[in-house]
Image (tube, grey):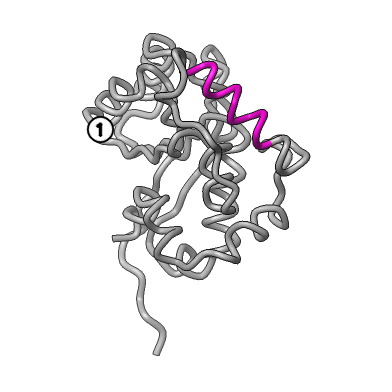
Amino acid sequence: MEKKKGFIVYYLLLCEGTTEYNLFAYLTRNKFRNLFDNSNIKFSDKIQVVEAGISQGKLNGVGHFADFQRKYNLIKQKYSGQKILFVLDKDLDDSLKIEKLILGGGDVVQFLIYNSEYLLLKLSGKKPKKEPSDFNDLKLFRNYCKSEFLKEFKKTTDKFKDSDFDLIFNNLNEEIIRNNFHEIFSTLE
């Protein structure tokens, strides 16, 4: 007998950019497709706030707290009462303030530690040799991670496809993946 699903819970999906969007899609529509398909959780990227440059589940960058707050307020105004899952890099100076704003609004945030390039390098076993504390400026750290990623994979993260993600994630056990993407998986609980 087939298990009956309860009420469907919808989340609006907002990713920092293409890389985070592709990574989220890979995890939920490929690697763990059955898990997410059999849950009562559904994600929608059908969100558009033209005046903030937001479309198809992408924030198109998060510069600093004031920039994010402006976008967040416009989203909350237009999509009042809807729960949102954000997928963001955690290498911004204002990451803690952004997290506090999101959680205070009753939404969920999945931070990628420290950024998508760093996380994918780490998960693939090609750990970057430096940490954010090795830099005077987080922008320099982000540039370092992008450069290391390009050196190792011969492409930028936004060009990664499912087959590229497979090379990384097929060598990891489920526990490691769940620990690195805890908030995404917590929506299923």
- The N terminus appears in which quarter of the rendering? bottom left
Query: Looking at the image, which is closer to me, 124 or 56?
Result: 124
How many numbered tags mark residues here?
A: 1
Question: Which of the 4 image quadrants contains residue 58?
Answer: top right
Residue at the limit of the structure toward the right, as seen here:
154
Residue 186 position within the rendered picture, expressed as x and y whole percent measured from the top left:
32, 54
Please tell me which residue is depicted at 54% across the width and 56% down the height of the picture: 27
**Quarter of the figure with the C terminus:** bottom left
Q: Which residue in the structure is indicated by mark 1?
A: 103
Q: Is residue 111 magenta?
A: no
Question: Magenta span: helix, strand or loop, mainly?
Answer: helix
- The x, y position of residue 67, in whole percent, is 43, 11
Quarter of image, res 113 = top left
For image coordinates 58% across by 65% down, the residue present is: 171
In the rendering, at what x and y percent does residue 39 appear?
Answer: 40, 65
**Mark 1: secondary structure:** helix
Q: Residue at x 60, y 48 (%)?
A: 126
| Residue 122 location (% of width, % of height) | 52, 47
Q: Which residues are magenta?
A: 138-149
Magenta segment: does it hold 141?
yes
Q: Residues within 10 Å of mark 1 (few under 14, many from 20)?
A: few
Farthest residue to the top: give it: 66
In the image shown, does 88 or 25 lie closer to the viewer?
Answer: 88
Q: Amino acid at mark 1?
A: Leu
